[in-house]
Image (cartoon, rainbow, N blue to C red):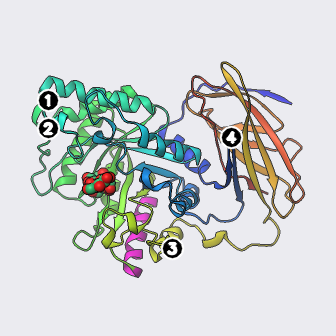
């Protein structure tokens, strides 16, 4: 049976991010050329990403492109996280080392890896005083304005529709009690207005991206966070396009999780922006570290507009503060007590709950592109039962914002409000004996975007 659909509405950015996070809760089992296989069961979530998705959030990590060739690193990344941030590869010095000469290789590597795993992406960062190539510091006012706007439009344009949130401006305020803007080249030459100018350029470059201001030492109520708060309130009041504030959340014994962390995030959310925890790491070990992580996760979960958490690296051994062992996996990729605390706070269960018994059937999915024409392609998803028989299955298929699914067959689809996320259920082909498979298919109108759809985990019933 063929079903025809038209989908014109756009989702809110927040809903889209959550849908992507849920789609990203899959476990990749096998990847061969053109075929991606994912599995899932109806058990309680047993990974950070899947548990966060069940809370309507993402759980991400900073990723370094040069570590993707290490199998333990990549296995941990793929299994546990459903959002990725380039740790250094999208900074200005990495992307545009010489004026007009863009190097997208390492950034592309991270984007392609993340999208191939169904992860959402955070872009970090467009306008920042640090990791600026030397040529930027030598520009006069007009040249710097042009260079800033060009950089934003080139970088965001390249990844348009693929990066859910961008840190448009990073660390623009001084530490301490002054509440002043940091004396960066942007501040010196362009004055206070550079921040809103950057946000306007960013909105024009990718209207679907969530635009964030990101900073550190703004995690509690203090002079610096007050200054950021006043800026965001002013932007919202004047219609400057800002959607989100990122709280880096780098903590250690000198700078512990503030007692008013949740209250501070909440007051920003009340301004009408999302809040995100963007670079979380907490130096320490054992129970003390676990308790601090739990506090942070619970604060996010208590705030409906806290849309996700990113830790600043996969493993202690590659952390920018490696000696402080601030992350969730040790240098051998073992889960630390902090990991267990985070998973539990997110409502997950180690190992995914009790195996065996009714309702424990599982299924896996594989995706393949089967045909391509000038404006469209056909995709096929094969659903295979695990070791037990199943009587139903559910699989999500998420296409890019320029893409549209025009036709489906051998399944019963339903749609989110955007039309980009299709949830497919059986159409008479739900009963599968152990190892048995069935397929459904669909046609994607490419709209210039030929990337494969993201296929969520197969959920058996
Ligand atoms: O890759 C080169 C290597 O080839 C060279 O031999 C080596 C020698 O110094 O440097 C390597 O690059 C380093 C890079 O990290 C990759 O490891 C840079 O020197 C080093 O400066 C860079 O540090 C990064 C730092 O930002 C730069 O400011 C950290 O990895 C990164 O974690 C850190 O991230 C920042 C966020 O962007 C913003 N918020 C704070 C956060 C922590 O500082």
**Residue 367, relative to residue 344: is it above or below?**
above
Residue 289, position as x, y percentages in the image: 38, 75
Instruction: Determine whether label 2 and label 1 are within 8 Å by CB.
Output: yes
Label 4–label 1 contact, CB within 8 A: no
Element under disc 1: loop
Which of the two labelled residues, at mark 4 and mark 1, occupies the earlier sequence position?
A: 4
Identify which residue, 320 or 386, lies in the foreground: 320
Observer-nearest of 359 and 37: 37
Earlier in the chain: of badge 4 and badge 2, it is 4
User: What's the distance in space between the residues labelled 2 and 3, CA to CA?
Assistant: 43 Å
Q: Which mark is residue 139?
A: 1
How would you rate the neighbour count of disc 2 (Cα within 10 Å): few for under 14, some for 14-19, many for 20 or more? some
| Residue for point 48% across, 68% down | 342
Answer few, some or many: residues within 10 Å of disc 3's Cα (few below 14, many 20 plus, some between 14 and 19).
Answer: few
C-alpha separation, residue under disc 4 versus residue under disc 2? 46 Å
Label 1 CB-ligand 1 distance < 8 A: no
Q: Which residue is situated farthest in the top direction here? A: 374
The magenta stretch spans residue 299? yes
- Magenta part of the chain: 286-301
Q: Are marks 3 and 4 in contact (CB under 8 Å)?
A: no
Q: Which residue is mark 2?
A: 185
Q: Which mark is residue 334?
A: 3
């Amino acid at each position: 049976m063929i079903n025809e659909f038209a989908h014109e509405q756009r989702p809110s950015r927040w809903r889209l991010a959550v849908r992507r996070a849920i789609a990203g809760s899959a476990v990749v089992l096998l990847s061969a050329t053109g075929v991606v296989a994912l599995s899932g069961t109806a058990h309680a979530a047993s990974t950070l990403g899947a548990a966060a998705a069940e809370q309507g959030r993402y759980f991400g990590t900073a990723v370094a492109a040069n570590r993707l060739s290490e199998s333990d690193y990549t296995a941990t990344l793929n299994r546990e996280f459903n959002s990725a941030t380039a740790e250094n590869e999208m900074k200005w010095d990495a992307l545009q080392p010489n004026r007009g000469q863009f190097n997208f290789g390492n950034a592309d590597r991270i984007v392609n890896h993340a999208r191939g795993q169904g992860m959402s992406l955070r872009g970090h960062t467009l306008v920042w005083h640090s990791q600026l190539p030397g040529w930027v510091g030598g520009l006069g006012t007009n040249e710097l304005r042009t260079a800033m706007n060009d950089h934003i439009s080139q970088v965001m344009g390249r990844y348009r529709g693929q990066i859910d949130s961008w840190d448009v401006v990073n660390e623009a305020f001084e530490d301490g009690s002054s509440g002043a803007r940091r004396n960066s080249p942007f501040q010196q030459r362009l004055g206070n207005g550079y921040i809103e100018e950057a946000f306007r350029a960013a909105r024009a470059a990718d209207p679907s991206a969530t635009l964030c201001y990101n900073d550190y030492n703004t995690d509690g109520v203090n002079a610096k966070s007050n200054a950021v708060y006043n800026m965001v309130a002013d932007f919202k009041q004047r219609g400057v396009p800002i959607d989100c504030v990122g709280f880096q959340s780098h903590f250690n014994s000198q700078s512990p999780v503030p007692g008013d962390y949740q209250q501070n995030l909440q007051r920003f959310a009340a301004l009408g922006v999302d809040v995100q925890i963007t670079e979380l790491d907490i130096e320490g070990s054992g129970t003390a570290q676990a308790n601090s992580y739990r506090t942070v996760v619970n604060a996010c979960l208590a705030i409906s507009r806290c849309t996700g958490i990113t830790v600043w690296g996969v493993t202690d051994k590659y952390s920018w503060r490696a000696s402080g062992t601030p992350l969730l996996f040790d240098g051998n990729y073992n889960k630390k007590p902090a990991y267990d605390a985070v998973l539990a706070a997110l409502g997950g269960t180690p190992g995914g709950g009790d195996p065996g018994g009714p309702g424990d059937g599982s299924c896996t999915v594989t995706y393949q592109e089967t045909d391509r024409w000038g404006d469209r392609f056909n995709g096929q998803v094969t659903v295979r039962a695990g070791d037990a028989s199943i009587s139903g299955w559910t699989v999500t298929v998420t296409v890019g914002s320029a893409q549209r699914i025009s036709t489906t067959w051998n399944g019963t689809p339903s749609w989110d409000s955007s039309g980009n996320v299709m949830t497919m259920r059986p159409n008479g082909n739900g009963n599968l004996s152990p190892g048995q498979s069935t397929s459904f298919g669909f046609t994607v109108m490419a709209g210039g975007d030929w990337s494969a759809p993201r296929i969520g985990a197969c959920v058996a019933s």
